[in-house]
Amino acid sequence: MITLEFSPDAENELPARLNAFSDLSTEHEIDLRYDFFSCRVSLSINEETFLGDSYVPLLDFTMSLSYMLHTLHDSGKGSITFTENSNEINFRKTGSTIHAADNSGCAANCTFDELVQTSRDFSFRALDYLFSRYPTLRNHPSLTALQESIRTFAN
């Protein structure tokens, strides 16, 4: 079983120069990825905790998750790294089994389908949350591309 959750933190979502009514559709993608929407994210696979309520930028994590799924599907290997700390979670696909391991020694297995479903559900929940709070984000080109990237695993 995979658990992948986020806990919003309204105080850490936007840089001080902006508010909920700002037009975020024109912000640079890099700024949106790294300087916005910091929240707690937790990831556990079969009761092994890879992220335990770590503060990370939600969009960066969601984009990294999508990229990891695509590289894992295409090459059998993928990883998620963090700019906030030295954590790295590596994923290796053998048949339909995924082996996940991080640089602290945490390791667990799951199925590729379960990883895809959990990651997709997390990503859509994260985007739905952000779009409900910041409607202008719907018009940002990088988020449109992210939605399409996530949808490719819908079938």
Image: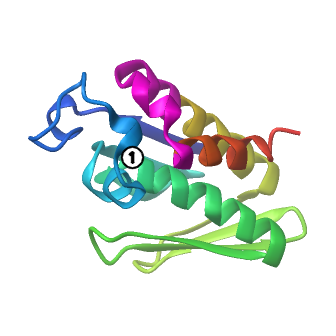
The percent coordinates of residue 9 (x first, y second) are: 23, 33
| Residue depicted at 79% across the width and 56% down the height | 112
Q: Is residue 129 magenta?
A: yes
The amino acid beneath tag 1 is Leu
Residue that carries the numbered disc 1 in the rendered image: 58
The magenta segment is: 126-142
The percent coordinates of residue 42 (x first, y second) are: 41, 47
Asked whether 67 or 107 is in front, the reply is: 67
The percent coordinates of residue 132 (x first, y second) are: 42, 19
Left or right placement of residue 31 versus residue 11 in this view: right
Left or right placement of residue 5 versus residue 109 in this view: left
Q: Is residue 28 magenta?
A: no
Q: Quadrant of the N terminus?
A: top right
Q: Quadrant of the C terminus?
A: top right
Badge 1 density bin: few <14, some 14–19, many ≥20, Cα 10 Å: many
**Residue that sits furthest to the left in the current view:** 16
Choose top left, top right, bottom left or bottom right for residue 7. Answer: top left
| Residue depicted at 90% across the width and 69% down the height | 95
Q: What secondary structure is the magenta-colored segment mainly? A: helix
Examine the rendering and report whether any part of residue 92 can be seen.
yes
Asked whether 110 or 130 is in front, the reply is: 130
| Residue depicted at 36% across the width and 25% down the height | 134
Choose top left, top right, bottom left or bottom right for residue 26. Answer: top left
| Residue depicted at 18% across the width and 40% down the height | 12
